[in-house]
Amino acid sequence: MENTKLSGTLRKNIQTGKTAEIVQKNHQRTGELTEGIVKRILTNAPSHPHGIKVQLETGEIGRVKNILS
């Protein structure tokens, strides 16, 4: 894994096709991360304090914590 991780709170850091770590709604208490490839960006705002909401290619939806590539 690369050392450079971009924050998931800024929409400009996220593009479709990039690998990201997200927290799904049902894992917010534990902070469990799910890794996958971004299929769609669901948040329209330029930033969000808890992370931009995305859908992964697997269909899972959550807020981005880290952008990996």
Image: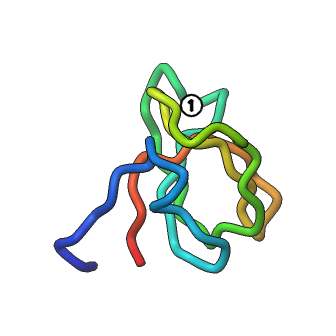
Tell which residue pokes out farthest to the right in this image: 59
| Front residue of this view, candidates 6 and 32 | 6
Mark 1 residue element: helix
Residue 23, horizontal then vertical, whole percent: 54, 40
In the picture provided, is 48 more to the left or to the right than 5?
A: right
In the picture provided, is 55 more to the left or to the right than 16?
A: right
- Dot 1 crowding, Cα within 10 Å, few <14, some 14–19, many 20+: few
For the point 22% across and 71% down, which residue is it? 4
Q: Amino acid at mark 1?
A: His
For the point 39% across and 70% down, which residue is it? 68
Q: Is residue 18 above or below residue 30?
A: below
Tell which residue pokes out farthest to the front in this image: 46
Query: Looking at the rendering, in which quadrant would you find the N terminus?
Result: bottom left
For the point 76% across and 70% down, which residue is it? 57
Query: Looking at the rendering, in which quadrant would you find the C terminus?
Result: bottom left
| Front residue of this view, candidates 14 and 61 | 14
Tell me where residue 2 sits by quadrant: bottom left
Which residue is the site of mark 1?
27
Residue 51, horizontal then vertical, whole percent: 50, 38
For the point 44% across and 41% down, which residue is it? 9
Residue 67, horizontal then vertical, whole percent: 42, 63
Q: Is residue 8 above or below residue 68?
A: above
